[in-house]
Image (cartoon, grey):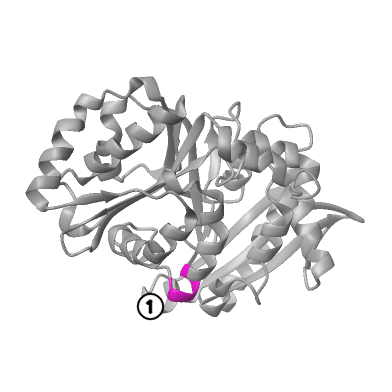
């Protein structure tokens, strides 16, 4: 018999966070999260998302053994401001037992009905800066620190329980040797002169911080038209600055400003921490920090985490300025492979940006929905 219990204590939340370590302990491709960081994500006193959202966490038991988990999320900005009556769910992991997944999904469906929401969608996080999607292709490639990995059987469970595909995402990669600078070098000089733009270079994190809020404002503007978008609030900006910017080499942050010093384009690239995080195995101490710092300094693989262009400058070639900056930096660093985070299949604008680099799709993922 399967029983589902809500997590109400810090001890229980730690069990929730550590559950995937048991079902992926033999996986070469799963990348463990940093346990402390996961716990802070779920801490209502530390994560400002809880000012505009609520979350409940559940564990499934077979006897005394934990066999599954799920987070039930309502983002009230989405529900009340955007009038999208969605019951979100994420951090959904389970053994290959249909009764387990059924019990967990029915739990979040009942919560959605209680809130008079119209449908469920998952796996998703609280916002666009969280992980998204169940992986449907690419099980033989190591995950990244900013995506979920899952066993192939997960998809069968969604279908079995009456869920249909809601959104589709792809992840691609390309060899840095594929990059032909002629596709953007001359163009970026013309674009900078025509629109009176200049690129900013950073040598340390302190230089980045005065522009960080403007970057999140631009993120809100440039992604507002996407179907999955929920804006980042001022309080969330402070949280994400502390959470992410420390992981990013300052030279991997590129900003483009106009003649009035207005930020009109940005991109953030991160070193690929996958192997370092596997060695850390969820812990920063005593040796996890060492592995992460080594990867931050020496990784020859990078992940394009975010890129945004102000709506007034979209389709005007501003990305050529950004790519030129990265080409110089990556050449100096000896970068070998560039990876991209999950991108919506219907986001034609972003796909056009990368077409000259001959990217190869190596993973696909989907979110699933069910009407309530």
> From what the image shows, is residue 112 above or below residue 368?
below
Q: Nearer the viewer, residue 8 or 238?
A: 238
Q: Nearer the viewer, residue 280 or 294?
A: 294
Residue 295 position in % (x across, y down): 61, 37
Residue 350, picture quadrant: top left
Range of magenta residues:
233-237
Asked whether the viewer can see residue 372, the reply is: no
Residue 361 position in % (x across, y down): 42, 29
Q: Which residue is mark 1?
A: 81
Q: Is residue 189 left or right of residue 79?
A: left
Whether 234 is among the magenta residues is yes
Q: Main secondary structure of the magenta part?
A: helix
Whether 140 is among the magenta residues is no
> From what the image shows, is residue 164 above or below residue 14?
above
* SS class, disc 1: helix
Asked whether the viewer can see residue 19, the reply is: yes
Q: Is residue 313 left or right of residue 121?
A: left
Q: Is residue 170 left or right of residue 246?
A: left
> From what the image shows, is residue 150 above or below residue 163?
above
> From what the image shows, is residue 290 above or below residue 358?
below
Residue 154, picture quadrant: top right
């Amino acid at each position: 018999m399967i029983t589902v219990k809500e997590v109400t204590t810090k001890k229980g939340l730690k069990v929730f966070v550590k559950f995937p370590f048991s079902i992926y302990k033999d996986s070469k491709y799963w990348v463990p999260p940093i346990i402390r960081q996961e716990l802070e994500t779920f801490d209502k006193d530390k994560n400002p998302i809880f000012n505009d959202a609520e979350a409940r966490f559940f564990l499934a038991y077979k006897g005394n053994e934990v066999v599954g988990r799920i987070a039930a999320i309502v983002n009230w900005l989405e529900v009340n401001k955007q009038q999208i009556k969605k019951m979100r769910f994420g951090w959904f992991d389970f053994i290959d037992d249909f009764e387990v997944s059924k019990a967990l999904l029915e739990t979040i469906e009942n919560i959605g009905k209680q809130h008079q929401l119209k449908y469920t969608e998952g796996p998703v996080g609280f916002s666009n800066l969280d992980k998204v999607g169940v992986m449907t292709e690419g099980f033989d490639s190591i995950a990244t620190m900013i995506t979920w990995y899952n066993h192939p059987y997960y998809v069968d469970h969604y279908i079995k329980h009456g869920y249909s595909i809601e959104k589709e995402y792809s992840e691609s990669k390309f060899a840095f040797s594929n990059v032909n600078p002629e596709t953007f070098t001359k163009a970026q000089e013309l674009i900078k002169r025509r629109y009176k733009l200049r690129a900013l270079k950073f040598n340390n994190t302190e230089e980045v911080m005065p522009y960080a809020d403007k970057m999140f404002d631009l993120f809100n503007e440039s992604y507002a038209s996407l179907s999955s978008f929920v804006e980042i609030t001022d309080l969330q900006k402070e949280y994400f600055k502390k959470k992410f910017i420390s992981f990013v080499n300052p030279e991997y942050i590129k900003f483009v400003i106009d003649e009035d010093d207005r930020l009109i384009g940005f991109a953030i690239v991160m070193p690929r921490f996958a192997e370092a995080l596997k060695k850390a195995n969820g812990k920063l101490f005593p040796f996890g920090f060492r592995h992460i710092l080594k990867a931050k300094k020496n990784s020859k693989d990078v992940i394009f985490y975010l890129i945004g262009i102000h709506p007034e400058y979209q389709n005007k070639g501003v990305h050529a300025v950004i790519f030129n900056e990265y080409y110089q930096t990556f050449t100096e660093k000896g970068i070998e492979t560039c990876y991209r985070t999950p991108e919506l299949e219907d986001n034609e604008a972003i796909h056009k940006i990368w077409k000259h680099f001959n990217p190869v799709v190596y993973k696909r993922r989907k979110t699933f929905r069910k009407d309530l």
